[in-house]
Image: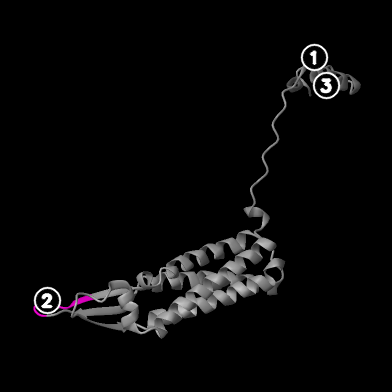
């Protein structure tokens, strides 16, 4: 493997793994805080909505990317190109999920999960923009890693021989009378006594 190919492969693997980790981390954080103001005397209700609730594809995409990072090392050729396509698609899904949360009105986003409450209630919501932005960045990183793999991955070799499964040892064949007779004739040809114990020969 040349130095350039090694660096390209490392960049793709690290990019996919980093994007997957960022997606999983951001998916568990609070993206939207929704407050439902209810008619008196009912108290307001506040609910924190995580990225996983608002965009279930975010953690799923993160898992796909982590698996892709491992697979990039294990496979080669056309299989690696397919994994690159999968990583690019997963990155596109992540980018779309983060961007949609940023562009959609927070109240509309929250209402889709918690509803609008009882009649006469008022729903207000605020977005913690850092987490959707982080998912958007993760998506762009995954798309870049995936496209790099699609374009260059077929030339990257797979795991070294030390990772390959060793070949099974050939079964030992039991000696037959014919084998012993042949050994005796060979001993006679060498001028040895075939009836003598080899351990007693000097």
Mark 1, residue position: 195
Report x, y in % for residue 121.
19, 80
Q: Is residue 137 magenta?
A: no
Label 1 crowd bin: few (<14), some (14–19), many (20+), radius 10 Å: few
Mark 3, residue position: 183
Residue 50 to residue 192: above or below: below
Which residues are drawn in magenta? 40-46
Residue 180 to residue 76: above or below: above
Q: Is residue 163 visible?
A: yes
Label 3 crowd bin: few (<14), some (14–19), many (20+), radius 10 Å: few
Q: Residue at x 56, y 64 (%)?
A: 68
Question: First in sequence: mark 1 or mark 3?
Answer: 3
- Of residues 171 and 9, the one nearer the viewer is 9
Left or right: residue 190 versus residue 3 is: right
Task: Say which mark, if any, is on residue 42.
Answer: 2
Report x, y in % for residue 8.
64, 73
Image coloring type: one colour
Can you tell which of label 1 and label 3 is closer to the viewer?
Answer: 3
Q: Is residue 127 visible?
A: no
Can you tell which of label 3 and label 2 is closer to the viewer?
Answer: 2
Question: First in sequence: mark 2 or mark 1?
Answer: 2
């Amino acid at each position: 493997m040349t130095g350039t190919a090694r660096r390209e492969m490392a960049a793709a693997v690290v990019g996919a793994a980093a994007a997957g980790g960022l997606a999983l981390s951001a998916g568990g954080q609070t993206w939207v805080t929704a407050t439902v103001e209810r008619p008196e005397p009912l108290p307001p209700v506040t609910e924190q909505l995580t990225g996983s609730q608002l965009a279930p594809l975010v953690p799923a995409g993160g898992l796909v990317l982590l698996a892709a990072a491992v697979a990039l090392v294990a496979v080669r050729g056309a299989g690696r190109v397919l994994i690159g396509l999968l990583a690019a698609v997963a990155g596109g899904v992540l980018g779309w999920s983060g961007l949609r949360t940023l562009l959609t009105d927070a109240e509309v986003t929250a209402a889709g999960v918690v509803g609008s409450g009882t009649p006469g209630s008022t729903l207000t919501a605020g977005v913690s923009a850092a987490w959707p932005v982080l998912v958007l960045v993760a998506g762009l990183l995954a798309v870049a890693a995936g496209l790099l793999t699609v374009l260059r991955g077929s030339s990257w070799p797979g795991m070294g021989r030390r990772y390959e499964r060793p070949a099974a040892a050939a079964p030992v064949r039991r000696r037959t009378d014919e084998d012993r007779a042949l050994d005796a004739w060979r001993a006679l040809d060498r001028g040895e006594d075939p009836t003598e114990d080899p351990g007693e020969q000097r």
